[in-house]
Image: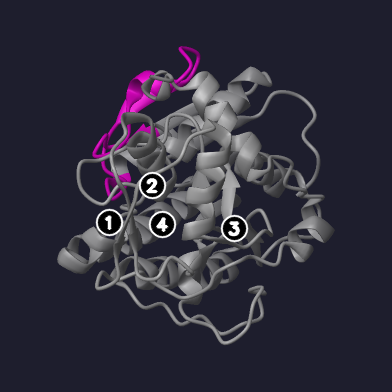
Amino acid sequence: MGEWGTSMRFLVTGGAGFLGAALANRLVAEGHAVRVLDDLSSGDRSRLDQRVAFTAGDIRDVPKLWSLLHGVDFVYHLAARVSVPESVLYPVEYNAINVGGTVSLLTAMRDAQIKRLVFASSGAVYGEQPSQPLTEELMPHPATPYAVSKRASELYVQAIGQLWGIETVILRIFNAYGPGQPLPPSHPPVVPHYLRQALTGASVVIHGDGRQTRDFVFISDVADALVAAAQAVGVDREILNIGSGVETSVGGLADTIAKVLGKELHRLGNGDAAAGVSRMVADVGRAHELLGYKPRVSLPEGLREILNSDARFARR
């Protein structure tokens, strides 16, 4: 894998999703040709630059993948179901789409003789760990069907990549956030959910004791990492953490939102609710070493960018 010269041709699976669209739009803005496959279960075609060639379809549809892979230089695999609570209710679907879809894509890549893949995994594969920050050498302990599906997909990517001669890089992406992040009616992501609650004057509900921590990484930093993973030399078979490297408690997130907005938040504790793992923060040293990755957007800066550029959060 080396630095790109002339225009390259890409397939981005899940490219109408939150992360996928940011990546696809970044690539076409840099002069590359981009094809997107997305089933629109959570994606939105309107996110995409008009120069992106969009196809609606299922990641498990191998004949469709063959047609999209024709003439492609490189594949980014972001297509997946991504809701942790939903995965607990529908583990069969999460296994079929996340794991089965990954195997289908790898099979189609072999048949089309495509040799390079970046796979978007998740920091969720680590589960509960006794020490922080999380390094790539730690044994994963996935604790939900979503996390299990991502870990199983990692293993398939590594094994099939080795067997079939496909160059692979796996990025374990932590809690990505930014403008345009979906806000589903049930189990919304915590950053846009808290912002919406704060702006509307509703109570900010904090699950558990609020001391559980996460690594919130801005979407542009994730896009930087995805682009770098395709260009870097000497990263074949690597698994790399992509986060901010900053540990933030859920209560601390509420504090930061209050400071950015300049207003007091009404907090409502829900100590009986499941709060997930107790701590999570990425060690991004290896990504810095191999990709030159350096997260640039702090949490306050990222929140301000959402307020300035996402119409849903226009100040009331």
Q: Which region of the structure is painted magenta?
A: 37-62
Observer-side mark, 3 or 4, equals 3
Residue marked by disc 3 = 171
Q: Secondary structure at mark 4?
A: helix
Q: Is residue 160 above or below residue 45?
A: below
Picture residue at 80% right of the left edge, 29% below the top: 5
Q: Amino acid at mark 3?
A: Leu
Q: Earlier in the sequence, mark 3 or mark 4?
A: 4
Q: CA distance from mark 2 to mark 4?
A: 15 Å
Q: Earlier in the sequence, mark 1 or mark 3?
A: 1
Q: Amino acid at mark 4?
A: Thr
Tell me where residue 25 sits by quadrant: top right
| Crowd class of label 2 (few under 14; some 14 to 19; many from 20; radius 10 Å) | many
Left or right placement of residue 73 versus residue 285 in this view: left
Confirm whether the magenta stretch covers residue 48: yes
Picture residue at 42% right of the left edge, 19% below the top: 314
Label for residue 107? 4
Q: Position of residue 156 (x, y in %)?
A: 46, 70
Q: CA distance from mark 2 to mark 1?
A: 8 Å
Left or right placement of residue 133 versus residue 56 in this view: right
Q: Earlier in the sequence, mark 2 or mark 3?
A: 2
Residue marked by disc 1 = 97
